[in-house]
Amino acid sequence: MGYRVAVAGATGAVGREMLQTLAERNFPADKVIALASSRSAGREVSYGEDDVLTIGSLDKFDFADADIALFSAGGDTAKEVAPKAGAAGCIVIDNSSAFRMDDDVPLIVPEVNADTVERALPANGGRNIIANPNCSTAQLVVALKPLHDKFGVRRVVVSTYQATSGAGKAAMDELFNQTRGIYVNDPVQPELFTKQIAFNAIPHIDKFLDDGFTKEEWKMTAETKKILDPAIELVAHCVRIPVFIGHSEAVFIETEKPMTEKAVRNLLRESDGITVIDHRADEGYVTPHEAAGEDAVFISRIRKDPTIENGMVFWCVSDNLRKGAALNSVQIAELVAERGLYGR
């Protein structure tokens, strides 16, 4: 018997990607229900290559009629609806930041901490809610996990170069419209972003905190500690760049144990969810353009950091709509299915 799966926020970029990923990976679903706000009810959305689903109203849906719900409907909606869905016996996998740091909600990247999934069940103190991490955190911890297991990661310094799709469809539209406008000499008018995004880089993602870091940078630190190891020290600097899809990260790590470039390269090549493309040549690395539409976390430019004793540097790229959101959510749903977990 298959699962009844609801996708909340099905009209958004991540929601559509969730539906596509469910179909591509042949998730064992007897029924897939597309949900969005009441103003989108009645519209149609694609599921796989041939099927079309009619959007239902999220605020009118009875989650007792679903076994698993993938949420990409925003934090405020998640805070209101997800606990009700969980109380109805539906296991919610939420893509927002609403529940990520709650003690009774596991924060999961399946390649890293799959065994925490059962903590979501009420019998284990959970609320039938599982959190999906921030997109930039998800790809980073996939890369860090095997290195931490083998060498003991002590410290991480990461600079991110994040695509506009991380801020939603309106952000992608702003990049497109500004780029087109510049070519015809239209004045640039930032709307969603604080400054011009076309042909520019904005060192500011999410709101500023009192210590000068942004909330996006805080998320990477706090989420990495929760997912991987609270002892890891991490500092991040997050930048928005004029790319539609694909987050890139320059990662500097310090480990407890010594390591060589060869050992790191071989270890990453053998690790789940990672593809290493690392040739010291003009085209021997992966850019966000090549990562778009792919499931893997791509690692390139592995080299020794000569400034510290046990240091390594690498370039990490992934499709933020897939591994950073939709794919990771579906992988968590696959964990739920594989282990026969039910919220009821």
Image (tube, rainbow, N blue to C red):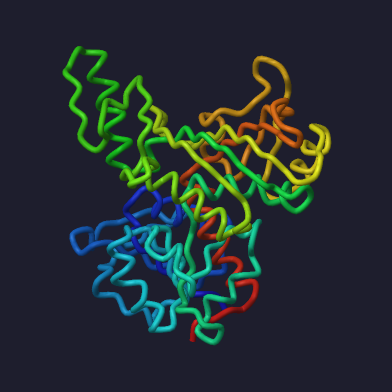
Where is residue 24? Give x, y as percent: 55, 53
Going by the image, does 338 lie left or right of 165?
A: right
State whether residue 251 is above or below residue 234: above
For the image, the number of numbered tags is 0
Q: Residue 12 versus residue 154: which sits nearer the camera?
A: 154
State whether residue 161 is above or below residue 97: above
Residue 328 location, quadrant: bottom right
Where is residue 201? Give x, y as percent: 38, 25
Rendered residue at 60%/58% (across/down) = 230
Where is residue 283? Give x, y as percent: 65, 19
Q: Residue furthest front?
A: 211
Going by the image, does 50 lie left or right of 45?
A: right
Rendered residue at 48%/48% (across/down) = 135
State whether residue 179 is above or below residue 128: above
User: Can the viewer see residue 4?
Assistant: no
State whether residue 267 is above or below residue 306: below
Residue 75 location, quadrant: bottom left
Rendered residue at 31%/72% (across/down) = 81
Where is residue 84? Give x, y as percent: 34, 79
Q: Residue 198 versus residue 344: which sits nearer the camera?
A: 198
Rendered residue at 36%/40% (across/down) = 212
Looking at the figure, which quarter contains the N terminus? bottom right
User: Can the viewer see residue 14?
Assistant: yes
